């Protein structure tokens, strides 16, 4: 029985260990998101759907062929009054019924557009529609990349803050052990031990709060990636090296995806205007039909002339010309509405370019400030570590008070947190700088 229990415990431990922690580089996180996030999937589906829209527009230029059939029973035939002279009885009128009790017909009809300005414009607009959805899919991917990268760095920094608290807790426990030994030997006051115990309790509370923050931020990252929440992840520290950014040349904002999407939308509106103007032009189409009809006193199906049912065929070929003359100024109003939309999007283009320029300048300024802040905070951490080490040694030797020791410890924690905050500000500014240069896709190469 004991062996069975041990075997079950071993099996359970093996299953638990099989749920390995997934180590995520930034590239891994972004690649996973682009393949699994709903927004990215829907953008790809929109591109696919644009092909179907193109096929729909193209169908307007292709011939339309349809077949039809009918079966009619006429229980009461209409009579017509005609002049009897046609039948050798001048001066009289004759009531004659035309038609048969039963008629059945089948036919096929073809309709082909020969000249229709709206069809030609629609074919040109269809290609631009495909390009619009392709650019929109690219913009969606960039938005996914940006959200994932921001969430990724947020998780890292919060984990760093957790490490700071755990190191702080470790140092404070060492101080507690020293004071406890001194108190037991009558060399320290109970209030000093109580102060340290309160300090440890506060650190534990802060640690639990940060642990909760880490879990919440990891869940947000997994959501942005389209990853199951129960997946365990780990972020390597090597991902956060500080590198100098290229700030010498101002990028061409007209190449940004946001701007290109508006330009493509402007092109579509131009086609829309031309499509409305097409109502001023005539249309010409070719029609053709072939029909077969049977008539008789009985249902014509499967009947012959011997049954009084006669079958015959007929065909027609023609041209249909439609020349618009006056539409009550409706077409003119539609053209002016289309022109108004074009003017509106031109304003949007100007505003977007100004916004993108501002985004780049702000990111550049934030990068420079963050680098200065990181260098300062790094030196400050070194200095705070030296002060804490010296104060700790002095306290052990009785040359410093507990208050001095706790103050130096607080200063060290604050310096370390300031450093990680500066690091986060730098990484977030770096993402914005890369975005403002239209290079977010390069993050998939890191």
Image (cartoon, rainbow, N blue to C red):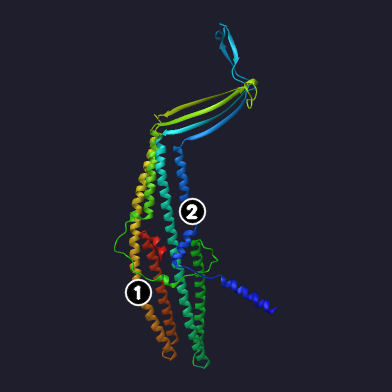
Residue found at x 43% / y 88%: 395
Q: Residue at x 48, y 64 (%)?
A: 221
Q: Mark 1 to mark 2: distance in Å?
A: 43 Å
Which quarter of the figure has residue 153?
bottom left
Residue furthest toward the left? 248
Q: Residue furthest right?
A: 1
* Residue in the foreground of this view, choosing between 198 and 342: 342
- Residue at the spot x=52%, y=28% of the render? 290
Give the percent coordinates (x, y) of residue 198. Answer: 51, 81
- Residue 249 seen in render: yes
- On residue 42, the disc is 2
Identify the image quadrant of residue 75: top right
* Rendered image: mark on residue 356: none
Residue 375 badge: 1
**Callout 1 touching callout 2 (CB < 8 Å):** no
- The answer to whether residue 169 is above or below residue 280 is below
Q: Is residue 116 left or right of residue 87?
A: left
Q: Position of residue 91 (x, y in %)?
A: 56, 6
| Element assignment for label 1 | helix
Taking 145 as reference, is 406 above or below it? below
């Amino acid at each position: 029985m004991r062996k069975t229990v041990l075997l079950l415990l071993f099996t359970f431990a093996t299953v638990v260990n099989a749920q390995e922690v997934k180590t995520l580089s930034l590239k891994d996180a972004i690649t996973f998101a682009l393949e699994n996030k709903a927004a990215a999937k829907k953008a790809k589906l929109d591109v696919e759907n644009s092909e179907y829209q193109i096929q729909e527009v193209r169908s307007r230029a292709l011939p339309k062929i349809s077949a039809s059939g009918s079966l009619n029973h006429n229980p009461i035939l209409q009579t017509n009054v005609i002049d009897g002279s046609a039948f050798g009885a001048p001066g009289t009128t004759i009531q004659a019924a035309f038609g048969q009790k039963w008629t059945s017909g089948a036919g096929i009809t073809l309709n082909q557009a020969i000249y229709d300005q709206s069809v030609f414009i629609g074919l040109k607009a269809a290609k631009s529609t495909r390009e619009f959805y392709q650019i929109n899919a690219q913009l969606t991917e960039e938005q996914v990349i940006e959200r994932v990268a921001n969430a990724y760095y947020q998780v890292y920094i919060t984990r760093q803050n957790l490490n700071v608290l755990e190191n702080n807790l470790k140092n404070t426990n060492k101080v507690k052990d020293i004071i406890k030994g001194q108190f037991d030997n009558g060399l320290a006051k109970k209030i000093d031990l109580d102060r340290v115990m309160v300090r440890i309790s506060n650190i534990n509370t802060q640690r639990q709060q940060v642990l909760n923050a880490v879990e919440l931020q990891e869940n947000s990252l997994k959501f942005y990636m389209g990853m199951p929440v129960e997946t365990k992840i780990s972020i390597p520290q090597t991902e956060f090296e500080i590198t100098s950014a290229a700030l010498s040349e101002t990028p061409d904002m007209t190449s940004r995806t946001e701007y290109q999407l508006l330009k493509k939308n402007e092109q579509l509106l131009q086609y829309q205007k031309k499509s409305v103007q097409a109502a001023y032009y005539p249309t010409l189409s070719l029609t053709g039909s072939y029909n077969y009809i049977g008539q008789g006193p009985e249902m014509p199906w499967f009947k012959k002339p011997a049954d009084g049912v006669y079958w015959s065929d007929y065909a027609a070929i023609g041209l249909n010309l439609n020349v618009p003359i006056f539409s009550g100024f409706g077409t003119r109003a539609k053209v002016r509405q289309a022109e108004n939309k074009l003017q509106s999007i031109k304003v949007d283009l100007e505003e977007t370019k100004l916004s993108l320029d501002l985004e780049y300048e702000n990111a550049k300024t934030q990068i420079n400030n963050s680098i200065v802040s990181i260098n300062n905070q790094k030196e400050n951490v070194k200095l705070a570590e030296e002060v804490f080490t010296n104060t700790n040694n002095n306290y052990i030797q009785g040359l410093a008070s507990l208050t001095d020791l706790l103050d130096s410890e607080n200063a060290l924690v604050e310096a370390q947190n300031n450093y990680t905050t500066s690091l986060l500000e730098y990484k977030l500014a770096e993402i914005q700088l890369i975005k403002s240069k239209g290079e977010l896709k390069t993050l998939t190469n890191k």
